[in-house]
Image (cartoon, grey):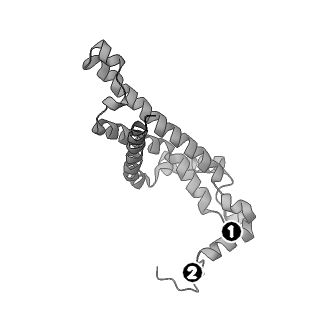
Amino acid sequence: VGATKETRLYPRGMRDVFVGIWKLDGIKGFYQGYGIALSGVMVYRALHLGGYDAVKTEILYGRRFSEHTPREAAHATDMNLKMSERFAAAQIVSIVAGTLCYPIDSVRRRLMMQAGQPLDERLYRNSFDCFRKVFVNEGMQGFFLGIGPNIIRSFGGAVLLVGYDVFKGAIGV
């Protein structure tokens, strides 16, 4: 905003970004934060999918003793869940999983943003160093900066879970 081609850090756009990262870091520079990103995705998906199934099971279990006879309860399945119950469970799980994994995402973003900088100007050496420095300098709040849009984005994750659930039921899995 307000910068001219001569004053911009990368005047030719993404080409300059790629060349700058390649010159300073080589191929390794393109993977800054990749390890923590991979770890974060595994934890997030485990919480997301596993949590959704666990919450659905708890809803059915709670209903088993309040609404059904023992014979009906023994045959309660996911098909007995209303769409609103599925969506509520999915939304809760999406928000919880996103919030629990957000510190990992924050570290990933910080590491990726320093790719292409000279080594002596980088704030963090690796993921552990980043976690430590953020916690010491900013406290727990430093890990949750910008979480608001992530919580709003959880709506899409909830729709994905319910869609997956409905599709799974439609094909008989």
Q: Position of residue 136 (x, y in %)?
A: 57, 47
Report which quarter residue 71 is drawn in.
top left
Q: Position of residue 144 (x, y in %)?
A: 47, 49
In the image, residue 61 sits, relative to residue 71, either above or below, namely below
Q: Residues within 10 Å of mark 1 (few under 14, many from 20)?
A: some
Determine the residue located farthest toward the top in the rendered image. 70
Dot 2 lies on which element?
loop
Q: Residues within 10 Å of mark 2 (few under 14, many from 20)?
A: few
Task: Using the numbered discs, state the Cα–Cα distance from disc 1 to disc 2 in whole angstroms.
Answer: 16 Å
In the image, residue 104 sits, relative to residue 73, either above or below, namely below
The three-letter amino acid code for the residue at tag 2 is Arg
Residue drawn where x is 58% and y is 53% of the image: 108
Q: Taking 83 as reference, is 20 left or right?
A: right
Determine the residue located farthest toward the front in the rendered image. 171
Dot 1 lies on which element?
helix
The three-letter amino acid code for the residue at tag 1 is Ile
Q: Position of residue 45 (x, y in %)?
A: 52, 42
Q: Taking 162 as reference, is 1 left or right?
A: right
Q: Taking 36 as reference, is 54 left or right?
A: left
In the image, residue 6 sits, relative to residue 52, either above or below, namely below
> Does the CB distance between marks 1 and 2 fall below 8 Å?
no
Report which quarter residue 89 is drawn in.
top left
Pick whichever of labels 1 and 2 is earlier in the sequence: 2
Q: Position of residue 159 (x, y in %)?
A: 37, 47
Which residue position is annotated with label 1? 21
Q: Which mark is residue 8?
A: 2
- Which mark lies nearer to you, 1 or 2? 1
